[in-house]
Image (spheres, rainbow, N blue to C red):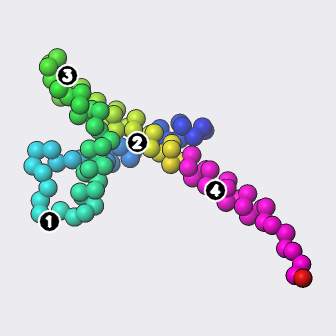
Amino acid sequence: MRLAVKCALLAIPLEIALCGLWAYPVDGGFEPTDGLLDHATAYFWMVLHWPALLALRALERRGAGAWIELLLFYASGWVQMTVLLFLAALALRVLTRRYRTALTHEPAHRPAH
């Protein structure tokens, strides 16, 4: 399978988990007892779904239903999660290739004078 397809498929369960478990608490905000992981994940959710949040106003003016808005949130987060996974996979591939070439091309030992 190609790398982009793998990333797109992996992004589906990650997006469901991110939206289902740690959706940003838009209505109520955070509790004082919420941990750092809850805050960090919620803000990450906010960044991933920023295009959908910006489009909500236009959708509401046109009379879009709640299902369309939910679909927009999932699609927006899925696309951006796919891009992030793809970039991370490319970076990991480049780093591992450089590491392998550095190991195979060690400089020859010079005799001491």
For marks 4 and 1, the one nearer the N-term is: 1
Q: CA distance from mark 1 to mark 2?
A: 28 Å
- Alpha carbons under labels 1 and 3: distance apart: 35 Å
Looking at the rendering, the stretch of residues picked out in magenta corresponds to 90-112
Q: Label 2: which residue?
A: 81
Q: Amino acid at mark 3?
A: Ala
Q: Earlier in the sequence, mark 4 or mark 2?
A: 2
34 left or right of 88 in image: left
Residue type at mark 1 is: Thr
Q: What residue is disc 3 on? A: 58
Q: Are marks 2 and 3 in contact (CB under 8 Å)?
A: no
Q: Nearer the viewer, residue 3 or 48?
A: 48
Residue 61: percent from left, percent from top: 14, 19
| Quarter of the image that includes the N terminus | top right
Q: Secondary structure at mark 2?
A: helix
The quadrant where residue 107 appears: bottom right
